[in-house]
Amino acid sequence: MSSLLLFISILLLFTTICFSSRIPIRSDYEVSLLYEGWLVRHNKSYSDSSEKERRYDIFKDNLKYIDKHNAGNHTYTLALNVFADLTVEEYRATYLRTLPPRKWKMENDSETFNDNVGVAPDSIDWRDEGVINPIRHQGGCFSCWAFAVLTTVEAVNKIVTGDLVTLSEQQLVDCFNKGCQASYMDDAYQYIIDNGGVDTEADYPYTAKYSNSCDTTKESNKVVTIDGYRSVRRNNENALKVAVADQPVAAAVEGYGQNFQLYGNGIFTQYCGTKVDHAVTLIGYDTEGGKDYWIVRNSWGDGWGENGYMKLERNIQSRSGKCGIASWPYYPIKYSNMKNKGNSLEGEAEEENARRSGEI
């Protein structure tokens, strides 16, 4: 019965949204079918019937908003995604946090800054290269920064060593952040460096909450290491493109709007500000219909966006990029022969630069 409800709800939504330029007029019965199908699709359940009814009312309001948007002429659609039973205020309170401004690292500090001067291909998708793990959901813990950082560490480890390992966000929550609160991504990279590495998700599994203490035994399991991290030149989408062409990059965006909350698919061109409140990973870029976009990996599960991803407009007039995407980009550094050679740091850096320029 649940499978039939899911099928009918998807069919109704596809028919009314995709084949009509007008806002659909939906009966209560149709909306209730969509709701029941949505509950099955996202494995949702509530504590009692009154909570289910309250969520249904929110669901109906979001559906009206989605239908109105999708009836217009846009480059992207909204959808009954995993957040369809949340008000925009609940969504913001649970999944977004704004960090206070922070002094940017000195641009002449070669150990932490890279101009990323070079030529990049027209498009790249690091999923095609097998360096990206399946999408996961951060849940009610504000740990997007941990997912963004570890996605880049997993990717560079795969690029350098050939091993794709799923790393422990819980370790960063428990041992570095000591809670489910906002954090700076560069500090998370520095923790991994200072700790000498990070454990696996299999050994230190994610619970979507702070464990109240750090498991120091698991913290000492340094399965994957990095040798440093760098920032991409701020407010420069071309520098960011060159960096992403070389490896996935962690970045911050402003996800404050309801359109971001209910994003379904297509190139997100909606106006958004630059007060960044959410961390994501840039895993590629491309062009479609003459419009450039970033491929953004999120940490809200595969029930949000395009199976967990977003196409975010690229090369806009604002120097900080769409939703501030070019404001705070970082990536980790890993040397392939760090443990096998006794080179000085300068020698390793020369090898890294040669690898980036294609000489190795």
Image (cartoon, rainbow, N blue to C red):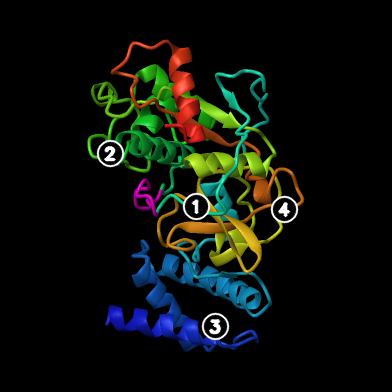
Q: Earlier in the sequence, mark 1 or mark 4?
A: 1
CA gap, disc 2 and disc 3: 41 Å
Q: Quadrant of residue 73?
A: bottom right
| Residue 316 tag number | 4
Going 44% across and 76% down the picture, which residue do you hit?
35
CA gap, disc 2 and disc 4: 36 Å
Residue beneath disc 2: 163
The type of residue carrying mark 3 is Cys
Kindly give the residue lying farthest to the front in the view shown.
359
Secondary element at image label 1: strand
Q: Earlier in the sequence, mark 4 or mark 3?
A: 3
Magenta region = 128-137
The type of residue carrying mark 4 is Ile
Image depth: mark 2 or mark 3 in front: 2
| Dominant secondary structure of the residues highlighted in magenta in the image | loop
Nearer to the camera, 234 or 57: 234
Going 30% across and 18% down the picture, which residue do you hit?
339
Q: Is residue 152 left or right of residue 276?
A: left
Q: Crowdedness of circle 4 by 10 Å Cα count: few (<14), some, many (20+)?
A: some
Image depth: mark 1 or mark 3 in front: 1
Is residue 295 visible in this depiction of the protein?
Answer: no
Residue beneath disc 1: 124
Q: Do the CB atoms of the residues marked 1 and 4 lie less than 8 Å apart?
A: no
Q: Do the CB atoms of the residues marked 2 and 1 lie less than 8 Å apart?
A: no
Residue 263 coordinates in the image, percent (x, y): 55, 63
Image depth: mark 4 or mark 3 in front: 4
Q: Earlier in the sequence, mark 2 or mark 3?
A: 3
Residue beneath disc 3: 18
Q: Do the CB atoms of the residues marked 1 and 3 lie less than 8 Å apart?
A: no
